[in-house]
Amino acid sequence: MRRSPSASVEGFAELDRKLAMVEAAPSPHRKAAALRAGARVIGDEERRLVPVRSGRLRRSIVEIPDATNLPRSTDTIYIGPTLKDGWYGYMVEVGLGYGGAHPFVRPAIDMRGEEALGLVLSFLGADIVRAAQG
């Protein structure tokens, strides 16, 4: 019977240490800042695209981490009209009123989503790379 050659692998302790550091990076504060920066890109586009009569709907578009009915976490952010004006924003978006649909949310995501994601990744990527090198 032939014996297979034995191999030894070293460095798992160091790899585990670096993976733990990467997992801890970035901080919750940094994650929240990255999401706010990316959300601002989408929110600005929504405000640019929303049809304006009185301007109230445009002024109600927010980027907030603690919206009603969303989990509270540094990994979640709400972008859109406030709860008070959300029903009207929905009607404008899908056309449940007199004037037909005037989408502004979906087009904002379609047009600026990649940019927003890139911004979030640039915020977080630097922290992750630093942690992996440490």
Image (tube, rainbow, N blue to C red):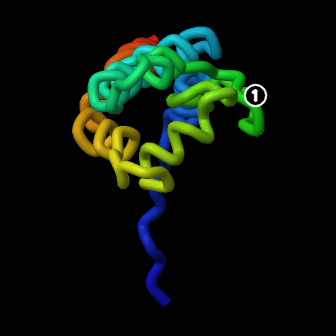
Q: Residue at x 75, y 31 (%)?
A: 68
Which picture quadrant has residue 120?
top left
On the question of residue 60 being in view, the answer is yes
Q: Residue at x 68, y 30 (%)?
A: 83
- Percent coordinates x, y for residue 28 in the rendering: 64, 16
- Percent coordinates x, y for residue 93 in the rendering: 43, 47
Relative placement, left or right, of 22 versus 129 is right
On the question of residue 121 being in view, the answer is no
| Residue with the mark numbered 1 | 72
In this figure, what is the number of numbered marks?
1
Relative placement, left or right, of 25 versus 48 is right
Q: Nearer the viewer, residue 94 or 109?
A: 94
Say what amino acid the circle numbered 1 marks. Arg
Q: Residue at x 48, y 25 (%)?
A: 57
| 10 Å crowding of disc 1: few (<14), some (14-19), many (20+) | few
Relative placement, left or right, of 39 versus 85 is left
Q: Residue at x 35, y 39 (%)?
A: 104
Which picture quadrant has residue 95?
bottom left
Q: Tell me: residue 24, above or below residue 71.
A: above
Q: Secondary structure at mark 1?
A: loop
Q: Nearer the viewer, residue 131 or 64?
A: 64
Q: Residue furthest front?
A: 98
